Image (tube, rainbow, N blue to C red):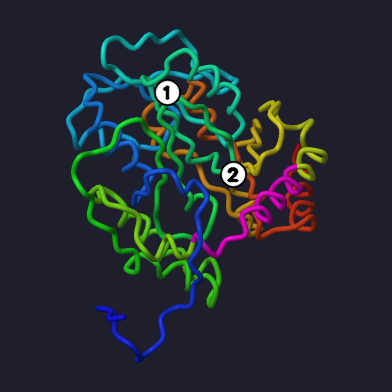
Amino acid sequence: MSSSNPIGGYFELELRRGELPHSDAVLLNSGRNCLEYILRTKQPKRVYIPKFTCDVMLEPLDKLKIPYILYSVNERLEIKEEIEPKGDELLVYTNYFGIKTDVCYELSQKYGWRLILDYSQAFFAERPAGSHVFYSPRKFFGLPDGGMLYTDQELEERLPVAKSSSHFGHLLKRIEDGAEAGYGDFKTDDQALSNLPLMAMSKLTQRLMANIDYEASKSRRDRNLAVLDRVIGQKNKLTLKAPAVGLLCYPFLSDDSSLRHKLIEHKIFVPTYWPNVLEWTKETELEHQLADKLLPLPIDQRYDQDDMSKIAKLILEDN
């Protein structure tokens, strides 16, 4: 059988081929471009978007010149005041940390196709039918990019396939030189995802995803979550009522604004979700307090009970 592929020569990175989770989704090059895909197909007049979200979510809205309204969430991370999208308006809600899945189902029953569910922080969570849902697997695994979208309408145009090798370096550098050595590359590679054209998921990202042990990852996350919740759960001002389902992190809310710095000093790297919220809001607003004091503690598949005990000990010293 003839083939256009060359035979022989140097080896490629050896990654197996296989079926991906969410394989029936539309595979795209980023989570934010999943939102753009929906906006292109639905062409809404206006979009409601949470104030407590990453500013990259505004990129497709600005790009397509679609007006939006920022709304507030309450202390349960749910929509604070009633929103009623009219006509072809759309509403975006985030499944925060993967703990608001039940709320997502309720909202889907209420809003149907007018609801866009951001599951970037909820890779393992079940999704409701009838609403648009998108995932961002690189939040959970060592991947350069990628987004996975469930929606009810396809674009008529054929999307070009993305290339990922140019923003892959931080993943390799962390293995050989450590997290701190690769952090500069991570920021560069992360910035490279800004304003990317809408494209299909790269072959590299798909091959990398085919090598992940998803069940082991979910189980490890669940065990680590259980350890932290057992030890520091009573100190957490954010109530976790949802069952553990491979959560992104353990969201720990504290009154101590200095705790983040202390953890980082001990090489426990906890990001801020999201720095832009501090600029968008006043200090008296709940979203401002969440961005400032909510600590997304790492519980992912790289870590074990000893790591969780170290985190818990540092937190209990000051609480």
Quadrant of the rendered image containing residue 55: top left
Can you say which quadrant of the picture contains the C terminus? top right
Can you say which quadrant of the picture contains the N terminus? bottom left
**What segment is highlighted magenta in the picture?**
209-225
- Residue at 79% in and 45% down: 227
Which percent across, then down, holds residue 19?
50, 57
Residue hosting label 2: 248
Which percent across, then down, holds residue 146?
40, 52
Which percent across, then down, holds residue 254?
66, 33
Residue hosting label 1: 282
Main secondary structure along the magenta-highlighted residues:
helix
Given the image, on which type of amino acid does mark 2 rest?
Leu
The mark that comes first in sequence, 2 or 1, is 2
- Residue at 25% in and 19% down: 46
Q: CA distance from mark 2 to mark 1?
A: 27 Å
- Residue at 30% in and 32% down: 153
Magenta highlight on residue 220: yes
Tell me if mark 1 has few (under 14), some (14-19) or many (20+) residues whose alpha carbon lies within 10 angstroms of its own.
few
Given the image, on which type of amino acid does mark 1 rest?
Lys
Q: Are marks 2 and 1 in contact (CB under 8 Å)?
A: no
